[in-house]
Image (spheres, coloured by chain):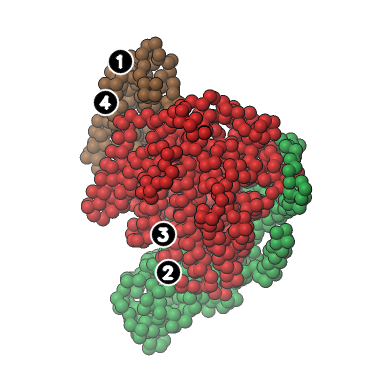
């Protein structure tokens, strides 16, 4: 019994991700972790807001930002959040293949987002000479958006690890919580991006 | 053990009284004997909460002592199991409400005074001094008067003087305990503090924000003189002509060395907006050398030959070629006759 | 892994056991050893500071070294002594108090410890090349301009250990929410568990602000960013906000567990239920809540303007209310009790007057206008030592005496305990009481020397003499610990007539804690059974297989990885060679994470039969 966590339609509990104490702990632990992450990003947002006009003669947010690309990025990430919801839906129905498929799509969307972000940074640096070191605004911008990008990158590596690892094992009570915590984390990344989109890009363009 | 406790209390009480009687500290440094507006207001708000909180402390101590005397385990009652009391709503309400009331008594004057001390409405009609904090010295630029001094700042008694403060490097904090509470001197965002002194005198100022190795040596003086003396001082400072040759031969040689060694590159003599190093116009009138040392020729020589020894981490060390004791003596001679005004710290009672 | 079979193990085996352990009791001990070591280090630094200030214009140590000394003393005491000692106690006791077999994330628990330890080592390695010298608060731009690598070590050391603390916080939260024994409702939890819970919330929401602050400082120092560089539009006050948004809750992270400890000890040794338990719980929560909105009272003199200063002054004063509630509840717990005074109780009783004075000066420094005088003077030094030594250190020492039998199976010697208490207590008041006056007499803090003839000589001399008394007290305590280890008798299971679950566990505590999870019938669960039952806890389950986690060396290796990477970060500004360390260390850490993530680790089971055999 100890090592047999695999599921079949008869034994599958309604919430496989929370069926064991370990699963429950992981679920709650991740929620708390996201609470801490919220403070982390709030501090970064605060720093950014304090420094966003400190351009030291360099390019300003109005000059830099183009909303088209950022809008595309927002769509990519929002969609990836939706696809991860599908994946979790299939997990609860114990349909491992479909879950993997939707997780794969989620990952691809994340990669596309990250590619856009790298292009964006490259563009700012080469077209405008706007770098991490050019002004306090530059430092704050790259730190805030970069921290988010780093979170996306970490999420993608995490996703790749659990997808590859469990590709042959199927779904069981031991790994279901892992997929679930990933999906929670991914939603959080998405929410943070919505704030970045609003506070950094929209407000940066309008103000 | 109870005897111990008792003795301890008597001892601490006695030492407390002795402390109060012996001194509140040096009279031109202590915050407990205020001679200025800000320090006076602060003392009011030091005393009020102290009194209130001491009463609270006494109540706690009385209950504490009763408990220790009355409810200790007694012989023959080792196994006694006291009543397991859950709580008491009346009591709990009492010790919630009364502290709130006490705090309101403290909070109301706190808010009033906070706004009072931040009131800068008459700044434009008053004397304004632009202060720059540097590692580890203070620069004072009298707005509109074309007077710059370092380390000693002269102000008229009974007048509000506004200090507009900015740092050239790290954060400092300007504190003249006897005249006023402190305010930080930041590298950005100018801060304004007013000082209104009630009595003439020389008051010690301190840097109160860690700013490097010589943080503890960054003293300055506020020299409070009468309005007439202040006007005289201003006139003298403005009339000072740095080009006039010193009287003694040694001082003339000293001046030549001062220029030769490029001291003049950092140290202005006479009015100048430049402030890389302290302005030396009234160097000889300063109450202290480098903020803390006695103003003697020997000390000046020591300072010039090896400033690092007096003020670790100062910015003067290594900025000029090595100076011999003899040359330093000549420079000291020159510096010691830089006394443009009759009004000095002695007039203020030092 | 089966510790039951290993009666006599070799030294190497013991070391390996501790390197790989995920058992909360052993991790608790590791925290105590580590924290105790850093406490001694910080104490040594304190003594050097006091010797330098024994007379005016003293030249015992140089100005630069003095600044390193104060920085290291503060940083070490807060981050690497007080906090780990408290977390150690939480680890050792909290799971027992709620009737759990372990914490929710044993692996993370071990990782948290190793990160703390390597963070502390990282910080102290800086002594070799020049320690940080910008104060434990590391205000920018002093810290960004500080030459050498001292501040870099500060940043990396705190970053590494901070990550560990954050994990610890999350771990405790999940443990308390999910793993309480049947019947252990929230309002039946012992106060120490409650404060652990609240403190974990504080850690969770406060530490990320420090993390961000440290990142910004690190970027400015090592990667030329411009957050605090005024010339490029930076703003040095941002650091102060971030630091104190973390720093003020940190004060409560330290003091609240001590409050919990005193609540346990007062109840036990007056043989009375804690007076006003509900009020105590809510006062704790209220203090924590208010603790987040008062950070700027550390910044009254920054020039935030009268509106901000007034708001933060009033908010700060408000904290005095719940704290006062606690003091009176403790007094009323003692009132009418049958009070035993032993060492644990002495430390607790000594806390009441000491902490009340600290709270009293707390209200005084909250008074913004008066704080223009107190701020950055010795008055503030006196104030926070009254709360941190008189509250936290007294609390830790009380807790050590109280829980020593559970943790080390010994009872500390009473005579030595009393000697340590009285010398420390007297020394403490001698050292710090006078400093209130030194501050008001015009002595700013962090002064390498004070001048002659400024009326500060006597006070400083008294203060230094007091410090020697404190040092003596600490040495006596250490001697006591070593003495009972070799000469003491094994302690009984419940030496103090305890009230809570940790005293119902067999002695020595089995590594699975409870053979059967207990059924909790109310507050002070064990006391209830003593009064109304047969003195034994009712099991909530039949004897069955117990699931336990496997030990692992990965937490240790992961921390080593971050430790190595830390040096890479510090020295990449100087030489490209350092990138080997940077990437090598990170690779090791990430590799460990990957192994952890990919290798299924289901733990193991202690079978019912084994348990029954052990019982015989």
Q: Position of residue A172 (x, y in %)?
A: 36, 20
Q: CA distance from mark 3 to mark 1?
A: 58 Å
Q: Nearer the viewer, residue B54 or C414?
A: C414
Image vertical order of residue C329 relative to residue A104, above or below: below
Q: Nearer the viewer, residue C124 or C150?
A: C124
**Residue at 34 percent of width and 37 percent of height:** A147
Chain C representation colour: red
* Sequence-first disc among 1 and 4: 1
Asked whether the viewer can see residue C574, the reply is yes
**Residue at 70 percent of width and 62 percent of height:** B4
- Which secondary structure, mark 1? helix
**Residue position for label 3:** C133
Can you tell which of label 4 and label 2 is closer to the viewer?
A: 4
Query: Residue lying farthest bottom?
Result: B249
- Which secondary structure, mark 4? helix
Asked whether the viewer can see residue C356, the reply is no
**Residue position for label 2:** C62
Instruction: Kindly indicate whether the residues beneath marks 4 and 2 are on one polypeptide chain.
Output: no
Q: Position of residue B287 (x, y in %)?
A: 51, 75
Q: Position of residue B241 (x, y in %)?
A: 42, 76
Q: Give the chain letter at badge 4.
A: A
Instruction: Kindly indicate whether the residues beneath marks 1 and 4 are on one polypeptide chain.
Output: yes
- Tell me if mark 2 has few (under 14), some (14-19) or many (20+) residues whose alpha carbon lies within 10 angstroms of its own: some
Q: CA distance from mark 3 to mark 4?
A: 48 Å
**Residue at 44 percent of width and 38 percent of height:** C4
Can you tell which of label 1 and label 4 is closer to the viewer?
A: 4
Quarter of the image where one finds residue A114: top left
Q: Which chain is brown?
A: A
The circle drawn on residue B212 is none
Instruction: Kindly indicate whether the residues beneath marks 2 and 3 are on one polypeptide chain.
Output: yes
Q: Which chain is green?
A: B
């Amino acid at each position: 019994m100890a090592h047999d966590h695999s599921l079949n339609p008869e034994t599958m509990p309604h919430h496989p991700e929370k069926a064991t104490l370990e699963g429950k702990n992981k679920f709650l632990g991740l929620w708390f972790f996201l609470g801490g992450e919220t403070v982390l990003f709030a501090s970064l947002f605060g720093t950014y807001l304090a420094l966003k006009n400190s351009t030291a003669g360099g390019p300003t947010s109005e000059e830099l930002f183009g909303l088209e690309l950022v809008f595309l990025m927002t769509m990519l990430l929002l969609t990836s959040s939706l696809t991860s919801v599908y994946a979790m839906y299939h997990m609860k129905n114990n349909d491992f293949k479909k879950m993997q498929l939707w997780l794969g799509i989620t990952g691809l969307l994340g990669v596309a987002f990250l590619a856009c972000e790298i292009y964006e940074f490259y563009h700012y640096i080469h077209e405008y000479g706007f770098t991490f070191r050019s002004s306090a605004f530059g430092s704050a911008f790259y730190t805030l958006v970069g921290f988010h990008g780093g979170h996306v990158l970490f999420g993608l590596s995490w996703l790749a690890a659990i997808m590859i690892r469990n590709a042959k094992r199927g779904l069981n009570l031991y790994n279901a919580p892992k997929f679930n915590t990933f999906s929670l984390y991914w939603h959080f990344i998405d929410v943070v991006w919505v704030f970045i989109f609003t506070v950094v890009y929209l407000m940066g363009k309008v103000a | 053990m109870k005897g111990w406790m008792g003795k301890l209390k008597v001892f601490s009480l006695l030492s407390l009284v002795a402390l109060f009687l012996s001194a509140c500290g040096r009279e031109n440094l202590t915050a407990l004997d205020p001679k200025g507006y800000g320090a006076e207001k602060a003392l009011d708000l030091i005393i009020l909460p102290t009194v209130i909180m001491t009463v609270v402390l006494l109540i706690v101590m009385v209950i504490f002592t009763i408990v220790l005397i009355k409810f200790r385990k007694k012989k023959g009652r080792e196994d006694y199991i006291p009543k397991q009391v859950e709580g008491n709503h009346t009591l709990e309400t009492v010790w919630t409400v009364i502290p709130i009331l006490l705090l309101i008594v403290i909070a109301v004057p706190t808010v009033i005074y906070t706004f009072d001390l931040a009131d800068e409405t008459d700044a434009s009609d008053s004397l304004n001094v632009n202060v720059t904090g540097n590692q580890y010295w203070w620069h004072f630029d009298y707005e509109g008067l074309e007077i710059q001094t370092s380390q000693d700042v002269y102000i008229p008694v009974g007048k509000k003087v506004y200090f507009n403060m900015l740092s050239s490097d790290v954060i400092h904090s300007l504190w003249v305990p006897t005249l006023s509470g402190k305010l930080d001197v930041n590298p950005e965002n100018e801060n304004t503090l007013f000082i209104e002194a009630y009595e003439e005198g020389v008051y010690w100022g301190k840097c109160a924000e860690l700013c490097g190795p010589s943080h503890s040596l960054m003293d300055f003086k506020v020299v409070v003189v009468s309005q007439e003396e202040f006007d005289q001082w201003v006139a003298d400072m403005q009339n000072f002509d740095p080009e006039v040759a010193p009287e003694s031969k040694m001082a003339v040689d000293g001046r030549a060395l001062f220029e030769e060694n490029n001291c003049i590159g950092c140290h202005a003599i006479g009015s100048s907006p430049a402030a890389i190093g302290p302005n030396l116009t009234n160097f000889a009138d300063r109450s202290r050398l480098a903020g803390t040392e006695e103003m003697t020729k020997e000390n000046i020589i020591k300072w010039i030959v090896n400033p690092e020894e007096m003020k670790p981490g100062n910015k003067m060390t290594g900025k000029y070629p090595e100076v011999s004791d003899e040359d330093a003596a000549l420079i000291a001679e020159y510096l010691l006759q830089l006394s443009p005004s009759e009004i000095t710290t002695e007039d203020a009672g030092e | 892994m089966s510790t039951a079979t290993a009666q006599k193990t070799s030294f190497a085996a013991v070391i390996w056991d501790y390197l790989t352990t995920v058992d909360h009791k052993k991790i608790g001990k590791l925290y105590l050893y580590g924290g105790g070591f850093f406490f001694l280090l910080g104490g040594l630094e304190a003594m050097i500071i006091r010797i330098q200030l024994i007379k005016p214009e003293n030249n015992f140590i140089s100005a630069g070294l003095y600044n390193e000394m104060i920085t290291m003393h503060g940083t070490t005491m807060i981050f690497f002594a007080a906090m780990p000692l408290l977390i150690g106690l939480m680890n050792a006791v909290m799971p027992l108090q709620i009737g759990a077999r372990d914490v929710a994330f044993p692996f993370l628990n071990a990782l948290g410890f190793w990160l703390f330890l390597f963070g502390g080592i990282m910080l102290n390695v800086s002594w070799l090349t020049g320690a940080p010298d910008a104060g434990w608060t590391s205000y920018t731009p002093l810290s960004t301009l500080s030459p050498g690598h001292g501040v870099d070590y500060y940043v990396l050391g705190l970053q590494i250990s901070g990550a560990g603390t954050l994990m610890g916080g999350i771990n405790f939260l999940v443990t308390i929410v999910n793993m309480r024994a049947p019947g252990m409702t929230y309002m039946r939890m012992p106060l120490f568990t409650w404060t652990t819970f609240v403190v974990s919330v504080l850690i969770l929401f406060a530490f990320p602000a420090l993390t961000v602050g440290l990142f910004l400082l690190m970027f400015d120092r090592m990667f030329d960013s411009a957050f605090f560089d005024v010339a490029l539009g930076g703003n040095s006050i941002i650091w102060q906000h971030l630091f104190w948004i973390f720093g003020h809750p940190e004060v409560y992270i330290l003091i609240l567990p001590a409050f919990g400890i005193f609540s346990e000890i007062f109840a036990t040794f007056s043989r009375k239920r804690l007076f006003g338990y509900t009020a105590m719980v809510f006062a704790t929560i209220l203090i924590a809540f208010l603790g987040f909105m008062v950070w700027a009272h550390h910044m009254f003199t920054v020039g935030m303007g009268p509106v901000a200063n007034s708001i933060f002054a009033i908010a700060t004063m408000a904290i005095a209310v719940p704290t006062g509630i606690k003091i009176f509840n403790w007094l009323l717990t003692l009132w009418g009790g049958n009070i035993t005074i032993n060492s644990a109780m002495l430390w607790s009783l000594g806390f009441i007057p000491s902490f009340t004075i600290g709270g009293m000066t707390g209200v005084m420094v909250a008074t913004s206008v008066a704080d223009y005088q107190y701020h950055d003077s010795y008055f503030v030094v006196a104030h926070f030592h009254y709360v941190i030594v008189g509250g936290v250190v007294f609390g830790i020492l009380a807790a050590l005496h109280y829980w020593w039998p559970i943790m080390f199976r010994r009872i500390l010697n009473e005579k030595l305990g009393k000697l340590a208490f009285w010398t420390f207590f007297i020394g403490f008041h001698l050292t710090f009481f006078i400093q209130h006056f030194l501050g008001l007499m015009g002595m700013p803090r962090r002064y390498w020397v004070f001048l002659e003839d400024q009326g500060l000589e006597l006070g400083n001399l008294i203060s230094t003499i007091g410090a020697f008394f404190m040092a003596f007290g600490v040495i006596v305590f250490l001697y006591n610990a070593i003495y009972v280890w070799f000469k003491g008798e094994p302690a009984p299971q419940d030496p103090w007539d305890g009230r809570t679950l940790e005293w119902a566990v067999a002695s020595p505590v089995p590594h699975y804690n409870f053979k059967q999870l207990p059924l909790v019938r109310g507050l002070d669960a064990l006391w209830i059974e003593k009064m109304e039952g047969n003195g034994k806890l009712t099991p909530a389950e039949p004897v069955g297989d117990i699931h336990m986690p496997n030990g692992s060396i990965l937490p240790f290796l992961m921390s080593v990885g971050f430790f190595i990477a830390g040096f890479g970060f510090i020295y990449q500004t100087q030489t490209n060679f350092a990138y080997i360390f940077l990437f090598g260390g990170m690779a090791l850490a990430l590799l460990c994470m990957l192994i952890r993530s990919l290798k299924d680790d289901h733990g193991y089971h202690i079978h019912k039969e084994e348990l029954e055999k052990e019982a015989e």
